[in-house]
């Protein structure tokens, strides 16, 4: 019997036939990443409902030598949860409960399959907020956000997932289950295993639950869309806002060509009366007069061409659409190559201005789209018009980022898409330490083996 067949038969006997799906049509829904660039043919999709069932899956995988790819909302953008090499998909969406909500201490526990939106709702219900947010909140899951240390729209205020993570429950590649979900924030009892698993992209084990720190809710919010004549002026304005605007929640940067594409796809009207090549979407909270506070902050910025400020929910939501619809709008042009990178503040504006020419030098027919989080230097470089296996553009873009002292991955992880270039961000000694950790926690090499670390 083939190893995959034996694995499926053993799991069906252990967990029941409804937990192991081999129907090709069902498996196909788990076989392509969000961008459409990465494809696979998984022999099975396993759907555990408890941590004990996840442990049974890992133990059976060890017995039969079957590689596993954990998957949640499948909103990743670098092929980090795609079974391209015939791995079995472990669909963790059934682990979706929010439990142990502590409205006094501001904490809760969320299963790996819980959506970010559901965590946000549970936090609101307890009088708190959750500090991580991004456009895919309704489908992206806690397990995926822990695996990639996701940042998102509120990073400038609250930091990434790692900063919200108090502890985890997970099944390691050894088959052992670890469970440290503390009810306290201050806890220095040895190695921080939660921080180690956060950002590991499922290469050390399968996270099944997380203990999350909540944050105080923002005051009433005001949102502004502000047009600038240059990228440099917008980036400088983002820095000024970080230093001067209390309650700053988000500072997002978009360019005129991206806004035009969003408008063509969504039918949105022109956002401002005056045309602007670069725009910042700024959001801040204030318990007294958020509209006045934000309007005064915008009025004090240099280089502003035009601005719109909103406090009512529908108008604020419309302003946000000019930013949040970028990813889906770009995908209508074709499967994008995505380079989620971070630049030092001093290099950010020049990089955004120059990267289209960097791309055009090796791919003249390609189109480059940039947007991102101006306050923390994170720019999403999307390139359309390339073959799925094209690597020339990645070579020049990621090398430029490294030359400028930036990071080749800021949010989405290394995945399959960037592991060849890990050396641009990590020294040989660091990569060696990562390999040693993986060998200790996943000695059989079965946990998402084709992501993050390049082949030896």
Image (tube, rainbow, N blue to C red):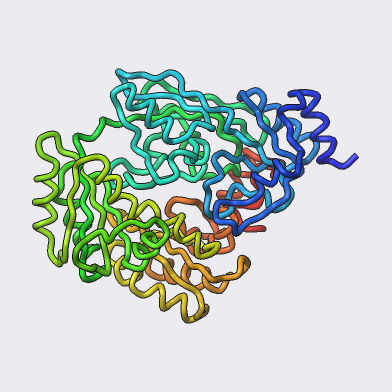
334 relative to 307 in the view: left or right: right
Residue 35 position in % (x across, y down): 55, 56
374 relative to 190 in the view: left or right: left
Name the residue furthest right: 1
90 relative to 270 in the view: left or right: right
Residue 283 position in % (x across, y down): 23, 47
Residue 120 position in % (x across, y down): 37, 32
Q: Quadrant of the C terminus?
A: bottom right
Residue placed most toward the observer, 28 or 87: 28
Q: How many marks?
A: 0
Q: Quadrant of the N terminus?
A: top right
Query: Is the residue 341 above or below the residue 277 in the image?
Result: above
Residue 319 in sight: yes
Residue at (30, 54) in percent of width and height: 252
Residue placed most toward the observer, 258 or 92: 258
Image quarter of residue 36: bottom right
Query: Is the residue 55 above or below the residue 26 in the image?
Result: above
Residue 87 position in % (x across, y down): 71, 46
Query: Is the residue 278 above or below the residue 32 in the image?
Result: below
Residue at (23, 35) in percent of width and height: 218
Residue at (70, 33) in percent of width and height: 58
Residue 196 in sight: no
Residue at (29, 68) in percent of width and height: 349
């Amino acid at each position: 019997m083939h190893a995959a067949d034996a694995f499926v038969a053993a799991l069906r006997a252990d967990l029941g036939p409804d937990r192991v799906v081999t129907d090709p049509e069902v498996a196909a829904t788990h076989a392509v990443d969000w961008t459409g660039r990465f494809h696979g043919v998984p022999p099975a999709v396993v759907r555990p409902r408890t941590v004990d069932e996840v442990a049974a899956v890992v133990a059976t995988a060890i017995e039969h030598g079957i590689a596993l790819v954990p998957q949640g909302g499948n909103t990743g953008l670098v092929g980090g949860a795609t079974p391209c090499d015939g791995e079995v998909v472990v669909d963790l969406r059934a682990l979706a409960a929010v439990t142990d909500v502590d409205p006094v201490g501001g904490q809760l526990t969320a299963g790996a399959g819980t959506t970010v939106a559901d965590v946000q709702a549970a936090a609101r219900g307890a009088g708190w907020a959750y500090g991580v947010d991004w456009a895919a909140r309704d489908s992206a899951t806690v397990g995926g956000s822990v695996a990639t240390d996701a940042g998102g729209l509120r990073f400038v205020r609250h930091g990434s997932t790692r900063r919200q993570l108090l502890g985890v429950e997970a099944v390691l590649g050894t088959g052992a289950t670890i469970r440290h979900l503390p009810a306290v924030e201050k806890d220095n009892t040895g190695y921080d295993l939660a921080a180690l698993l956060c950002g590991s992209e499922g290469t050390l084990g399968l996270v099944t639950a997380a203990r999350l720190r909540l944050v105080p809710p923002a005051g009433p919010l005001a949102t502004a869309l502000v047009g600038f004549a240059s990228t440099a002026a917008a980036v400088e304005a983002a820095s000024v806002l970080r230093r001067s605007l209390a309650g700053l929640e988000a500072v997002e940067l978009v360019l005129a060509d991206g806004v035009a594409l969003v408008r063509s796809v969504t039918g949105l009207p022109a956002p401002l009366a005056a045309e602007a090549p670069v725009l910042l979407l700024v959001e801040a909270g204030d318990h007294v007069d958020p509209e006045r506070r934000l309007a005064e902050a915008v009025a004090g910025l240099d280089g502003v061409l035009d601005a719109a400020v909103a406090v009512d929910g529908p108008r604020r939501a419309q302003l946000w659409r000019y930013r949040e619809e970028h990813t889906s709008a770009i995908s209508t042009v074709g499967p994008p190559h995505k380079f989620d990178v971070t630049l030092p503040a001093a290099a950010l504006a020049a990089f955004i201005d120059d990267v289209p020419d960097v791309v055009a030098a090796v791919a003249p027919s390609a189109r480059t789209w940039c947007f991102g989080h101006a306050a923390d230097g994170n720019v999403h470089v999307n390139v359309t018009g390339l073959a799925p296996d094209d690597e020339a553009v990645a070579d020049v873009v990621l090398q430029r980022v490294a030359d400028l002292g930036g990071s080749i991955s800021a949010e989405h992880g290394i995945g399959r898409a960037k592991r060849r270039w890990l050396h641009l961000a990590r020294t040989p000694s660091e990569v060696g330490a990562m390999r040693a950790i993986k060998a200790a926690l996943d000695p059989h090499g079965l946990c998402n083996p084709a992501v993050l670390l390049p082949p030896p």
